[in-house]
Amino acid sequence: MSDRWTYLLAGCVVAGALVPAPGPRLVALGCVLGALALRWPLLLCAAAGLLASFSAAAAAAEVSAAVQPGPFEGRIVLVADPAERNEATRAVADTSRGRLEVWAWGGAGARLSGLLAGEVVEVTGRVAPAAGGSPRMRNAGMVGRLTISEVGAPHPGGSPTPCGRF
C-alpha cells in the first residue's frame, strides 16, 4: 500500500469517527477483511470509514443510555465557569451520573452564575439524556442535561474528584 493510500485510509477513518451513523459493524468489518484479502485499497478505505462511523455511533448510544433520567438531588462539581445564555445560566458539571450540561433559570440561575469552576454545590433538578446525540456535547464528554430548580450553598473546590465518586 503506497503512502497516498495510507493517508486516504487515515482520512476515511477520521471522517467516519467524526460523522457517526448507526449501522451493522460486522458487515463493515467483513468488508474490511475482504478488502485486505483482495488487496483493494479503495474498498479498504471506504469500509474502514464505515466501520469507524458505525463504531462511533454505537459508542455514543451506549454513553447516552448510561445516564439515568429523572429527578436529581446531590452535589455537582463545576467544570467550567457558568455563563449566561438567553436569560438562563449554563455550565458543565461532573455529577454522580456523569458529566452533564447544566441549565438554570430565574433565582437558581442567578445563584449558579455567581459560582466558579471547581466549586462544589448541592442542587436539586431533573436529568435528561443528551438531546439528539449532539456532537458538541459528545465531544465535551457530556452524557446528558441537568435542569436545576434549586441551588444550595457552595463548598470550596478541593482536589479533583473523579466523576461519580462523591
Image (cartoon, rainbow, N blue to C red):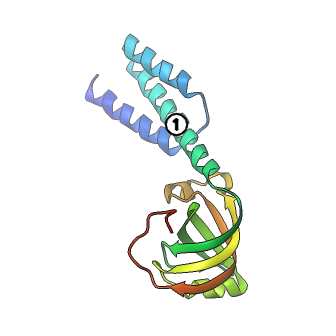
Q: How many marks?
A: 1
Q: Does 150 appear above or below 130?
A: below
At a point 54% along the width and 70% down the height, the residue shown is 92
Q: Is residue 82 visible?
A: no
Give the image location of residue 127, x and y in percent: 68, 64
Q: Left or right of 105: which side holds 44? A: left
Q: Which of the two residues, 70 or 63, is positioned nearer the viewer here?
A: 70
**75, above or below 42, in the image:** below
Quadrant into which the N terminus falls: top left
Q: Amino acid at mark 1?
A: Ser
Q: Seen from this angle, which residue lies furthest top?
A: 38
* In this picture, residue 72 sits left or right of residue 94: right
**Residue that label 1 marks:** 55
**Based on the displayed image, in which of its 4 quarters is residue 112 positioned?**
bottom right
User: In the image, residue 88 lies at what x, y percent?
Assistant: 67, 79
**Is residue 152 among the parts visible in the rendering?**
yes
